[in-house]
Image (cartoon, rainbow, N blue to C red):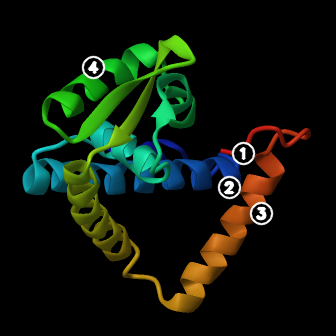
Amino acid sequence: MDLEARVHSTHPEALRLWLRMLTCTQLIEKQVRSGLRDEFNTTLPRFDLMAQLERAPLGMKMNELSRRMMVTGGNITPVTDQLVKEGLVERMSLPNDRRAWLIRLTPAGRALFKKMARRHEAWIVAAFSSLDSRELNQLHALLGQVKQHALPTDNTETP
């Protein structure tokens, strides 16, 4: 039984909507995880780490990488270590800060990520294929309103 089936019509509509959104997110994420595993023998955390590095061609420090991924350094260190071992990511020391490391995709890592990103995009498009363009735009706009309302009032951090 999924989360939304556990609530009754007596619960607020917003709660039922939240649970429906959560269920949809979990179902789509499960499909993405399965696709990454089956087609690329990789995991979603590895994909997410590579996605962050793809957006920073010159690389980024480990602490910035963990901040962007919203996890601790301890969570990304083993993932990074494995990607380095596979030649997909390189770790470079910084001359002005011997305690910090700069992490970036290697050419092989960049090429693999591009393949994975194309498939990821296809999986997401397929997940929303039951909606037409108007419905997609409407849903996007409505969720944008929810996001704006949920943002901190100082807007220092955007999810």
Residue occupying image coordinates x 85% and y 43%: 155
Residue nearer the viewer, 14 or 115: 115
Residue 110 percent location from the top left of the image = 28, 55
Where, quadrant-wise, is the C terminus in this rendering? top right
3D distance between C-alphas at marks 2 and 4: 42 Å
Residue type marked 1: Thr
Residue 52 percent location from the top left of the image = 45, 45
**32 vs 126: above or below:** above
Asked if disc 1 and disc 4 are in contact, CB closer than 8 Å, the reply is no
3D distance between C-alphas at marks 2 and 1: 26 Å
3D distance between C-alphas at marks 3 and 4: 37 Å
Residue nearer the viewer, 81 or 28: 81
Where, quadrant-wise, is the N terminus in this rendering? top left
Between marks 2 and 3 in the image, the one whose residue lies nearer the viewer: 3
Tag 2, which secondary structure?
Answer: helix
The residue under label 4 is 78
Residue type marked 3: Gln
151 vs 109, left or right, is: right
The residue under label 3 is 145
* Local crowd size for mark 4, using a 10 Å CA cut-off: few (<14), some (14–19), many (≥20): few
Dot 2 or dot 3: first in sequence order is 2
Is residue 42 in sight in this rendering?
Answer: yes
Between marks 1 and 4 in the image, the one whose residue lies nearer the viewer: 4
The residue under label 1 is 158
Tag 3, which secondary structure?
Answer: helix
Dot 2 or dot 1: first in sequence order is 2
Dot 3 or dot 4: first in sequence order is 4
51 vs 144, left or right, is: left
The residue under label 2 is 13
134 vs 89, left or right, is: right
Residue occupying image coordinates x 70% and y 73%: 141
